[in-house]
Image (cartoon, helix red, strand yellow):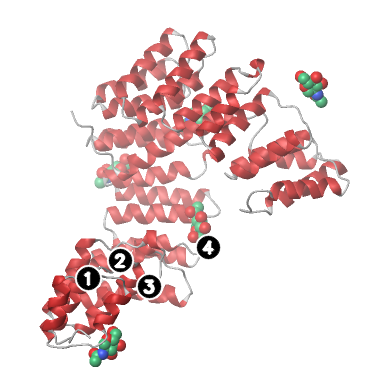
Amino acid sequence: MAPPVPSAGARLLLRRLLSTAVEAAETVAAPAAKTGAKGSKAGAKGAKAGAKDARSLYRRLSALGNAGDGSVSRVLNKWVLEGREARAVDLAKYVKELRKYKRHAQALELMDWMVKTKGMNMSYTNHAIRLDLIYKVRGIEAAEQYFVGLPDPAKNHRTYGALLNCYCSAKMEEKATDVYRKMDELGISSTTLPINNLMSLYMKLGQHNKVTRLFDEMKVKNVKPDNLTCCILMGSYAALNKIDAVEDVLKEMEEKDVALRWSAYSTLSSIYVNAGLFEKAESALKKLEGLVEAQDGRQPFDFLMSLYASVGNLSEINRVWNVVKDTFQKITNTSYLGMLQALYKLNDADRMKQIYEDWESNYENYDVKLTNMMIRAHLRNGMTKEAELLWEKAKEKGVDFDSVTCELFLEHYMGKGDITSALNWVEIMTKFSKKERKLDQEKISKFFKCFEEHKDVEGVERFCNCLRTLGCIDGKAYVSLLRTYLAAGKTNRSLRQRIKDDNIEICYDIGKLLKRIGDKGR
Ligand SMILES: *[C@@H]1O[C@H](CO)[C@@H](O)[C@H](O)[C@H]1NC(C)=O
Ligand SMILES: *[C@@H]1O[C@H](CO)[C@@H](O)[C@H](O)[C@H]1NC(C)=O
Ligand SMILES: *[C@@H]1O[C@H](CO)[C@@H](O)[C@H](O)[C@H]1NC(C)=O
Ligand SMILES: *[C@@H]1O[C@H](CO)[C@@H](O)[C@H](O)[C@H]1NC(C)=O
Ligand SMILES: CC(=O)N[C@H]1CO[C@H](CO)[C@@H](O)[C@@H]1O
């Protein structure tokens, strides 16, 4: 049976879940010290003078931004030259911070510096972290080599676990299973983390039966599942269209006293949504909301809004939005966007306008995604003027638009057959980088057909200029250009030269057309 097509919400959730699996793996690989801003603040409070210096070392590292290779070593060498101390414990903390902000190359450089320049010893945990960084920065082969080169005592559950995590992230099933088997032989596989990792790999690969088999193995090994195990299992049973089994998993987890978090119920709810079981979805959402704790932040509310939109309950969306407004001092653009998307789904344009205006008077950083969402709504409702006005207003503010804006207007005008307006948007689109430009062959043909029908020589010339800028002018485009000239009964002396300048061969068709529009071929 074909798995149900996941809704946008469910896909988002799945992606988040899988990335959580990987993050969880990394968290365990990291030292047991407390994570987050709280921890470092507490550390700063109890600081001595030396530690104060150390903080300013982190500030220097932090200020590097996205600086490339060698930048971290330069900062550290300069620091040491100034006669200051670089303590291993501090450096290890900075590695952690850099990883948190996904500055993996810099984190790795810092670790390499610790080892090579300072001859610092590596704990097993640090080996696991370094392995993970090497994978992220230099790839799987480099990570494998690093593992092979480790001294035997360092090949323990942490480093094996980190290697397994690399293979799972790289979706290398065979190698992952090999490592897992090896861990089995060594008697270090009987923990939740490696099994969760392997499960999420199988889930990503769509091998849902293997996921459930691993769960059986978990029971045999007497390993306690956690909320993540629960989410992965439910996802796999849902993909197998076994809703009853999904409910059984949840019951089993509750019986085993697994501390289920809100994410388990948002997974459950999106599974019900996909299965069209809206009432059950809503009751799962009630459970979800009951489990939200302060430390969970805004994310559960974003899911609540999105899922209530999926079940079509507008009053609940508005209620949750008010909870968000009451709970958090600041509303992020992500929350605003989530609210707009939810309202878009339910086609409540008036409420969208209210929310958008609320954001407009409160934002710190302009986020074009929100304006795009509003433009999308206006265009869908045929309110072209309002949409254009929004874009004009934003342009006056000096906002950088993205290719999505262009695409929205382009699609809209082409759909209406308003080629003149569509052409304006193609011209705007040429300002974006190549990979963002969306002009497929079908659209291109439609443009040419229209110009020829309307004998629109000026339009076709403008369009060909865009194609040239976009790097997709070809013989076919010139054939269309010439056919438009022919239809209009016009000619242009520079045509033959331009075709040559564009390195396009004057093929039979082009030659014939050139002759017919009166080009003498000189
Ligand atoms: C580093 O490890 C080596 C070998 O295990 C040991 O002999 C040495 O004392 C350690 N050095 C420090 C500073 O811990
Ligand atoms: C929305 O949810 C509320 C609370 O669960 C419920 O009372 C209401 O009937 C629902 N409305 C719709 C349209 O489903
Ligand atoms: C909010 O918008 C700014 C500007 O586009 C962006 O840099 C930032 O990542 C956005 N924040 C969130 C949470 O999406
Ligand atoms: C011929 O084409 C060029 C380039 O588009 C244009 O600048 C020029 O005005 C055209 N000449 C005539 C006579 O249409
Ligand atoms: C996906 C998810 O919610 N994972 C959580 C499972 O529980 C642990 C410990 O309670 C959390 O740290 C995870 O974030």
Under mark 1, the amino acid is Ala
First in sequence, mark 1 or 3: give its number.
3
Is residue 97 at least partly visible in the picture? no
First in sequence, mark 3 or 4: give its number.
4
Packing grade of label 3 (10 A; few <14, some 14-19, many >=20) is: some
**Could you say which quadrant of the image residue 422 lies in?**
bottom left
Packing grade of label 1 (10 A; few <14, some 14-19, many >=20) is: some
Under mark 4, the amino acid is Asn
User: How far is disc 1 from disc 3 in space, using C-alphas?
Assistant: 31 Å
Tell which tag, 2 or 3, sits nearer the viewer: 2
Tell which tag, 1 or 3, sits nearer the viewer: 1
Tell which tag, 1 or 4, sits nearer the viewer: 1
Mark 4 Cβ inside 8 Å of ligand 3: yes
First in sequence, mark 4 or 2: give its number.
4
Residue sitting at the far front: 522
Which residue is pictured at 83% across the width and 45% down the height? 80
Quadrant position of the C terminus in the picture: bottom left
Proximity of marks 1 and 4: CB atoms separated by less than 8 Å: no
Q: Which residue is mark 1?
A: 477
Q: Which mark is residue 472?
A: 2
Proximity of marks 1 and 3: CB atoms separated by less than 8 Å: no
Q: Secondary structure at mark 3?
A: helix
Packing grade of label 4 (10 A; few <14, some 14-19, many >=20) is: few
Position of residue 487 relative to residue 311, above or below, is below
Q: Quadrant of ligand 1?
A: top right
User: How far is disc 1 from disc 4 in space, using C-alphas?
Assistant: 41 Å
Which residue is pictured at 27% across the width and 85% down the height? 494
Query: Which residue is more in the foreground, 357 or 443?
Result: 443
Proximity of marks 1 and 2: CB atoms separated by less than 8 Å: yes
